[in-house]
Image: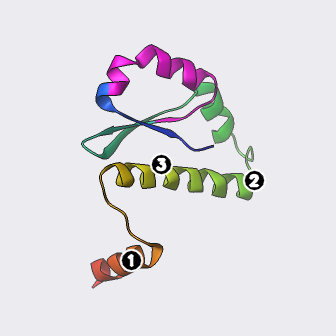
């Protein structure tokens, strides 16, 4: 499941609607000026995810992919798009 990305302004205007979506199991990422500032997810879902042994490695990897998808959406909205090879080059340059 990919998290929905909303701006802070939209989150303030639609808080009740977003909370309903969270209760249904959706995850909401709130961004301000293109930067992620908060994540909303169901307390019940979070509790189950955090329980020891509750998730498999495959489920954890899928959650990581989903989190990255939300990051890609934020970058896309900010007009930033790089290929995987470009991101690797940028990361390597930062290590020098």
Please give the residue where the numbered disc 1 appears in the rendered image. Answer: 86
In three-dimensional space, the C-alpha distance between marks 2 and 1, rounded to whole angstroms, equals 31 Å
Residue farthest top in this picture: 16
Residue farthest bottom in this picture: 96
Residue 9 position within the rendered picture, expressed as x and y whole percent measured from the top left: 29, 27
Q: Which residues are magenta?
A: 10-28
Res 56 label: 2
Residue at x 34%, y 26% (from the top left corner): 10
Res 70 label: 3
- In the rendered image, the vertical position of residue 44 relative to residue 71, given as above or below: above
Residue at x 44%, y 55% (from the top left corner): 72
Q: Nearer the viewer, residue 91 or 4?
A: 4
In three-dimensional space, the C-alpha distance between marks 3 and 1, rounded to whole angstroms, equals 19 Å
User: Between tags 2 and 3, which lies in front?
Assistant: 3
Q: Are marks 3 and 1 in contact (CB under 8 Å)?
A: no
In three-dimensional space, the C-alpha distance between marks 2 and 3, rounded to whole angstroms, equals 21 Å
User: Between tags 2 and 1, which lies in front?
Assistant: 1
């Amino acid at each position: 499941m990919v998290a929905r990305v909303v701006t802070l302004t939209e989150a303030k205007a639609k808080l009740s609607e977003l909370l309903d979506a969270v209760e249904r199991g959706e995850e909401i990422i709130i961004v301000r000026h293109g930067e992620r500032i908060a994540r909303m997810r169901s307390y019940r879902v979070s509790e189950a995810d955090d329980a020891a042994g509750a998730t498999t490695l495959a489920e954890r990897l899928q959650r990581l992919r989903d989190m990255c998808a939300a990051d890609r959406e934020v970058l896309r909205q900010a007009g930033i798009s790089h290929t995987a090879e470009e991101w690797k080059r940028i990361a390597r340059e930062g290590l020098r």
